[in-house]
Amino acid sequence: MPKKIIARLFIFAAIGVAAWLIYRTLRQYTLEEIVRSVLQIPVAHLAAGIGFVVLSYLCLTLFDTLAVRYVGHKLPYHRVALASFTSLSIGHNVGVAALSSGAVRFRFYSRWGLSVEQIAKIILFCGVTVGVGLLTLAGLCCLTMPESAAPIIGLSASGARLLGITCLAASAGYVVLAGFIRGSLRLFRWSFEMPPLQIAVGQVLVGTANFLCVSACLHQLVLAFGTPGFFETATAYVGANLTALVSHVPGGIGVLEATIAFLLGQSASIGALVAFRAIYFFLPLPLGLISLSIAEVRRWDSARSLDSKAKS
């Protein structure tokens, strides 16, 4: 089967899966339950939550910006931002981000002159940035508020501090390795080409900033139903995110909500969790699908024009 047909089938499949995921998530609740619980959230908190979502996706565009520099390619920021937002707005909902968002990234970056190897490095680089960001935020939460983080992660306060030190040491170790190692770092069968020191520092900063923004979004919504602290909410989100990543459930649907509800208790009401998924996952999704559809139509038109010129 020609590659073009396979690519088009993937695009249509992604759109179909995304629509099905929205239906699957919302069918657990009656419309009345959803509307009533979401309406309990003050407009100011919803607006602030949406603002933090925008900041999060801006941080995510910097993931790709650093990644493109890492592979030694130059692209204008607006192109990188388009590829990043489109791929992640879809990948966050479809799940298995390395494959789903990676496939969308390939559609954009291959068109702009990057090789398959370079695109693979970009995908891996962004995955490492996610890991470093989660580690750093987890460490900050455990060290800043060990008494609050301890019951959430099931450790004593001293255990939470030790975990925080370990997480931050791992992030710092990554930066130190980037400063000393030139070439690939090998761990068993896994190999990763270390970035320059400045890029590694950038990974830690933007990775942490992204998850701080996501946690801030969730915190604004749960404040409508309780009084959890910011770092309590951030700790719960980090734990839920790790659980969702391990589970490989598409978009973390059900897993993310169940873990946050378990860790935060009554503060994580249906209204807060539905609103969080709606504004962080579902709100960017149609924008990403529209962006991808427009890009694909333009690509097909260009290919058709080239074919016509070649025949003539």
Image: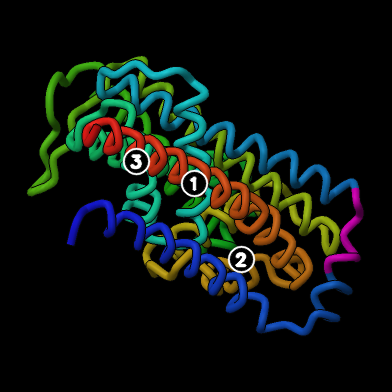
Vertical arrangement, residue 107 with respect to residue 256, above or below = above
Residue drawn 45% across and 38% down?
Answer: 298
Whichever of callouts 1 and 2 sits on the residue coming sooner in the sequence is 2
Q: Position of residue 296 (x, y in %)?
A: 43, 45
Q: In this figure, what is the number of numbered marks?
A: 3
Name the kind of residue labelled 3 in the image: Arg
Residue beneath label 2, please?
260
Residue beneath label 3, please?
304
Residue drawn 19% across and 56% down?
Answer: 2
Q: Is residue 137 visible?
A: no
Does residue 47 appear left or right of residue 287 in this picture? right
In the structure shown, which secondary structural element does the residue marked by tag 2 occupy? Answer: helix
Vertical arrangement, residue 50 with respect to residue 263, above or below = above
Q: Position of residue 162 (x, y in %)?
A: 43, 46
Name the kind of residue labelled 1 in the image: Leu
Please state which of residues 286 and 54 is positioned toward the viewer in this rendering.
Answer: 286
Does residue 235 appear left or right of residue 233 in this picture? left
Label 3 neighbour load within 10 Å: few <14, some 14-19, many 20+: few
Name the kind of residue labelled 2 in the image: Ile
Q: Foreground mark, 2 or 3?
A: 3
Q: Is residue 299 visible?
A: yes
Label 2 neighbour load within 10 Å: few <14, some 14-19, many 20+: many
Q: Foreground mark, 3 or 1?
A: 3
Which residues, given as a range, are shown in magenta? Answer: 38-43
Q: How is the image coloured?
A: rainbow
| Callouts 2 and 3 close, C-beta under 8 Å | no
In the structure shown, which secondary structural element does the residue marked by tag 1 occupy? Answer: helix
Please state which of residues 254 and 61 is positioned toward the viewer in this rendering.
Answer: 61
Residue drawn 37% across and 55% down?
Answer: 100
Whichever of callouts 3 and 1 sits on the residue coming sooner in the sequence is 1
Vertical arrangement, residue 283 with respect to residue 268, above or below = above
Residue beneath label 1, please?
292
